[in-house]
Amino acid sequence: NQKVVLITGCSSGIGLALATRIAKDEKKRFMVYATMRNLSKGEALVEAAGRTLGRTMEIKQLDVCNEDSIKACVDSLPERRVDILISNAGMGMIGPIECQSIDEMRSVMDTNFFGLVRLLKEILPDMKRRKKGHIVVISSVMGIQGILFNDIYAASKFAVEGFCESLAVQALRFNLNISLIEPGPVITEFERKVYDEGLKTDLSKADKVTADMFTNIYLKNYKQIFETLGQSADDVAEHTFKIITMENPPFRHQTNTLYTPMTTLKYADPNGDLPIDTFYKMVFEHDKVFNASLNFLKLLRWRSRKSFTLEKDKNKD
Ligand code: NAD
C-alpha cells in the first residue's frame, strides 16, 4: 500500500535530496514521481537515485509554469492518484526593484506562487474527492519575514503562505493536510544562481546610496550568512521526510533552529517594528552587531514549544 509522492523541481537542490530520501525509505512506503522542467537535466538525480530508479522512483517532466505539462504528468499516473504533493520548484531574485524589470518580477511570481496554484488546481479536486492527501509546500522563512533586497522573492513566498493559510481551513473539511516547510538559508544551486545574478545587476538605475548598500553591504555579507547559518539540502529533506511520515503534521515547520530567533521577533512585537529595527542594526552596524548577532544565533538553540526535535538534533545536545 505505497503512498504516491509527486515532487516538483527535482533536478537539483532540495527537490533532488527529497526525491532521493523518500525513494530510499527502508520500509519502501512511497512511490516517488520526481519531476523536472527539463528532462535533459536529470543526470544528477539519476545518479543519486541509484537502484531506486524504476523501483520506488520514476522521473517525469513537469513545468510548473505550464498547465498542459502539469495535466499530462498527472494524467500519466495510475488513477491520477497523488497522496503527497511536494511543491518545491522555485526561483530567487535579489536586488533593488528599480533595477529589475516587471517581466523578471512576474517570472518569480509565476514560478513560486502561480506554479503552486496551477498544481493545486489540477490535484486538489481529486484529493477532495478521495478525502485523502497531504500538500507540502517548500516555502521559506521569507514567507514570514521580508529580508533586505529580497522584496519580490519574499512577496512571492508571502503569497504562497497566505494562499495556503486560506486553503487550510477548507482542507480540514476534506480531511486533507497542508504543511509549509520554512527553511532559512540552504546551500544549493539556488544560493549560487541568485548570487551570480545579483552580481550582474545593472545598478545604473539605482541611486548611489542604494547601489552601495546592495554591493558593499548586502552582497558582501551574502556568502557569510550562508556559511554561518546555511543548512544542507539533505538536512531540509530529512525534516520534510519527518513531516510526511507524521500522523498529524503541523501547518508550519521551520527547519533551521539557528534562524528561529529572527522569526520570533515578528511575533514578539504586534507593531512590527522590532524585526525591522533589528535587521537595520544588523545591516548598518554590521561589523559589531552583525557578527555579535551571528555568534548569538549560533549559541542560541531556541525551540518553539510546538516544533519537534529530530533524533539527530537530540543527540547533539
Ligand atoms: P534549486 O535552484 O537547486 O532548485 C529549484 C528547482 O526548481 C530547480 O531544479 C529548478 O530547475 C526548478 N524550477 C524552476 N522553475 C521551474 C519550473 N517552471 N518548473 C519546474 N521546475 C522549476 O534551489 P533549492 O534551494 O533547492 O530551491 C527549492 C525550493 O526551496 C524553492 O522553492 C526555494 O524558494 C526554496 N528555498 C530555498 C532556500 C535556499 O536558500 N536555497 C531557502 C528557503 C527556501
Image (cartoon, grey):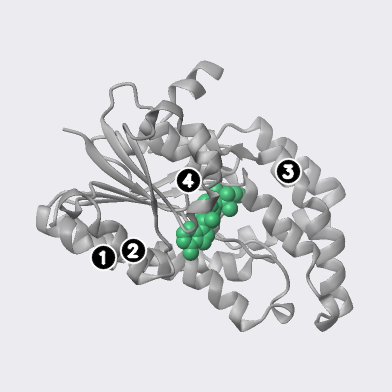
Residue drawn 24% across the image and 50% down it? 82
First in sequence: mark 1 or mark 3?
Answer: 1
Image quadrant in which the C terminus is located? top right
Q: Is 210 drawn above or below residue 82 in the view shown?
A: below
Horizontal and vertical percent position of residue 123: 24, 60
The disc labelled 3 sits on which kind of residue? Ser
Give the residue at mark 4.
15
Horizontal and vertical percent position of residue 193: 68, 56
Foreground residue among 66 and 231: 66
First in sequence: mark 1 or mark 2?
Answer: 2
Foreground residue among 129 and 289: 129
Are the residues tagged 1 and 3 within 8 Å (C-beta)?
no
Horizontal and vertical percent position of residue 86: 37, 49
Give the residue at mark 3.
293
The disc labelled 4 sits on which kind of residue? Gly
Question: Disc 4, ligand 1: is the CB inside 8 Å?
Answer: yes
Foreground residue among 285 and 160: 160
Q: CA distance from mark 1 to mark 4?
A: 20 Å
First in sequence: mark 2 or mark 4?
Answer: 4
Residue 195 placement: quadrant: bottom right
The disc labelled 2 sits on which kind of residue? Ile
Q: Is 132 drawn above or below residue 171 in the view shown?
A: above
Q: Residues within 10 Å of mark 2 (few under 14, many from 20)?
A: many
Q: CA distance from mark 2 to mark 3?
A: 43 Å
Give the residue at mark 1.
122
> Secondary structure under badge 2?
helix
Give the residue at mark 2.
70
The disc labelled 1 sits on which kind of residue? Glu
Are the residues tagged 1 and 4 within 8 Å (C-beta)?
no
Q: Residues within 10 Å of mark 3 (few under 14, many from 20)?
A: some
Residue drawn 48% across the image and 67% down it? 111
